[in-house]
Amino acid sequence: MGKPTSIKTSEAARDRLRVLAAERGMTITELVEELAARELTDTERQQRAFDAARELGVDYTEHIQQAGEDAWAKIRAHQGGATA
């Protein structure tokens, strides 16, 4: 672990993180580190999509990219996330 720091958040978010961490048997710090490591940046997500398309023999065009983004937006909407 690197140098300790603090993150400002609402009490509600802190309380939720506390519950999530406890359910997983870890500290809030460990949970936040796990979540940060698991989430991809836009650049990483784009590179993985490009690599997957190449493995499938598909040209990764803007049309393919948009279709993929639209599909993920619909998936998130059905999971209770952001609307499509």
Image (cartoon, rainbow, N blue to C red):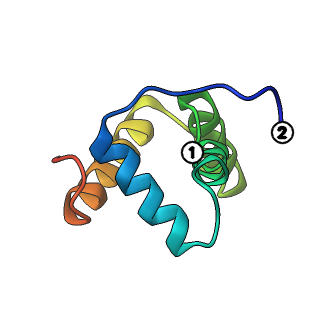
Gap between marks 1 and 2 measured at Cα = 18 Å
Task: Give the crowd class for mark 2: few <14, some 14-19, many >=20 residues within 10 Å.
Answer: few
Count of numbered circles on the image: 2
The residue positioned 22% from the left and 46% from the top of the image is 82
The residue positioned 31% from the left and 41% from the top of the image is 11
Task: Give the crowd class for mark 1: few <14, some 14-19, many >=20 residues within 10 Å.
Answer: few
Say which amino acid is labelled 2: Met
Q: Nearer the viewer, residue 56 or 17?
A: 17
The x, y position of residue 10, in whole percent, is 31, 35
The x, y position of residue 36, in whole percent, is 60, 42
Which residue has dot 1 on it?
39
The residue positioned 59% from the left and 40% from the top of the image is 40
Callout 2: helix, strand or loop?
A: loop
The x, y position of residue 76, in whole percent, is 29, 56
Which residue has dot 2 on it?
1
State which quarter of the image contains the N terminus.
Answer: top right
The residue positioned 21% from the left and 65% from the top of the image is 78
